[in-house]
C-alpha cells in the first residue's frame, strides 16, 4: 500500500510539475512532510531523484516536439543552478546538524516555502499590471540560476513556482517558454544536489525504499505533463499554475501548524 501511495504522489506531482514548470517537488516535499514516513534529508533526496527523472523525460519530449527553447537564457540559468544546488544542499545539511531537530527544520522550510508561494501567487495574478524587466547577459543569468538552485536544493522542492515567476518577470518571457527554462534549471540543480549527496554522505545512509516506484511515476508524469503542455493554451497552463500554488500553500500551512503544536 505504501508503494502505491508514493507512486500516485509521484505521478500526480510530476504531471502537474511538467505541465506548469514547477517540477513536482513543490508538491512532493510538503506532502511527504504530512505523511511523516521519512526524515527531512531523506525526503529531500527522494524528491530530487523523482524530479530529476521527470525533468529528463519532460525536456526530452519538448526537444522531440521541436519546442522553441531560449537557450541563450536557459543554459546560463542551468549552469548557475548547479552551483546553487551544491550550496543549497550544504546549507540544509549544516542547519540539520546545528539544530538537531527535524520538526524545527521542517517548519523553517515550510515557512520559507509559504512566503515564496504567496509572493509568486500575487505576482502571477497581477503580472499584467507589473512591467517585467528585460535582463540579458550571461553573468546575470548565472546569478539568477544560482539563486534558483539554492532555493530548489535547500527547500527540497526541485524549483517550484519560484523559477517560472522569476523568469517571467526578469526576462519578460511567456509562461510556456518560462516553463521550459524552469525545467532545464530544475534538471541541473538536481544533478548538482544528487552529485553532492553521492560525494559526501552517499545514498546508503538514506531510506530510499520507495525511490524505484517514485521514479516510475515520475517518468510517466513527465511524459503526460509534456504532452498536455503542447495541447493546453498559455492561459490554461497559467490557471493550473495558480491553483497548484494555493493547494501547496494549504499543505505548507498545515505542516507548520502540526509541527509547531507537535513540537
Image: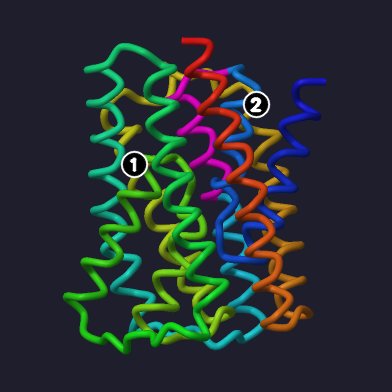
- In the image, 32 versus 210, the foreground residue is 32
- In the image, 245 versus 186, the foreground residue is 245
Q: Which residue is mark 1?
A: 195
The CA span between labels 1 and 2 is: 20 Å
For the residue labelled by badge 2, is the local secondary structure a helix, a strand or a loop? loop
In the depicted structure, whether residue 205 falls above or below residue 54: above
Which residue does the image show at 49% across and 55% down from the upper left? 118
Which residue does the image show at 47% across and 25% down from the upper left? 42
Which residue does the image show at 39% across and 87% down from the upper left? 131
- Dividing the picture into quarters, in which one does residue 142 lie? bottom left
**Residue 199 in the image, given as x and y percentages of width and height:** 28, 33
Looking at the rendered image, the quarter that the N terminus falls into is top right
Please give the label number shown on residue 122. none
In the depicted structure, whether residue 141 falls above or below residue 72: above
For the residue labelled by badge 1, is the local secondary structure a helix, a strand or a loop? helix
**Residue 138 in the image, given as x and y percentages of width and height:** 21, 79
- Dividing the picture into quarters, in which one does residue 27 lie? top right
The scheme the figure's colours follow is rainbow
The span shown in magenta is 38-52
Q: Which residue is mark 2?
A: 210
Amino acid at each position: 500500500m505504501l508503494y502505491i501511495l508514493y507512486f500516485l504522489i509521484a505521478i500526480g506531482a510530476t504531471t502537474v510539475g511538467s505541465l506548469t514548470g514547477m517540477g513536482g517537488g513543490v508538491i512532493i516535499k510538503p506532502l511527504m512532510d504530512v505523511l511523516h514516513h521519512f526524515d527531512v534529508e531523506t525526503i529531500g533526496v527522494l524528491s530530487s531523484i523523482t524530479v530529476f527523472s521527470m525533468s529528463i523525460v519532460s525536456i526530452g519530449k519538448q526537444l522531440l516536439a521541436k519546442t522553441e527553447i531560449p537557450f541563450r537564457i536557459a543554459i546560463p540559468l542551468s549552469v548557475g543552478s548547479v552551483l546553487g544546488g551544491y550550496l543549497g544542499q550544504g546549507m540544509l545539511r549544516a542547519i540539520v546538524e546545528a539544530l538537531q531537530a527535524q520538526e524545527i527544520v521542517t517548519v523553517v522550510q515550510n515557512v520559507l516555502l509559504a512566503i515564496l508561494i504567496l509572493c509568486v501567487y500575487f505576482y502571477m495574478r497581477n503580472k499584467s499590471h507589473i512591467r517585467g524587466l528585460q535582463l540579458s547577459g550571461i553573468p546575470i543569468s548565472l546569478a539568477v540560476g544560482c539563486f534558483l538552485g539554492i532555493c530548489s536544493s535547500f527547500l527540497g522542492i526541485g524549483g517550484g513556482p519560484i523559477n517560472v515567476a522569476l523568469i517571467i518577470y526578469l526576462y519578460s518571457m511567456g509562461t510556456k517558454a518560462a516553463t521550459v527554462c524552469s525545467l532545464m534549471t530544475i534538471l541541473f540543480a538536481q544533478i548538482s544536489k544528487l552529485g553532492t549527496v553521492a560525494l559526501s554522505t552517499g545514498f546508503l545512509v538514506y531510506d530510499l525504499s520507495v525511490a524505484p516506484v517514485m521514479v516510475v511515476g515520475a517518468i510517466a508524469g513527465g511524459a503526460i505533463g509534456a504532452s498536455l503542455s503542447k495541447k493546453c493554451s498559455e492561459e490554461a497552463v497559467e490557471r493550473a499554475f495558480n491553483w497548484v500554488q494555493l493547494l501547496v500553500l494549504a499543505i505548507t500551512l498545515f505542516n507548520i501548524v502540526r509541527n509547531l503544536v507537535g513540537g
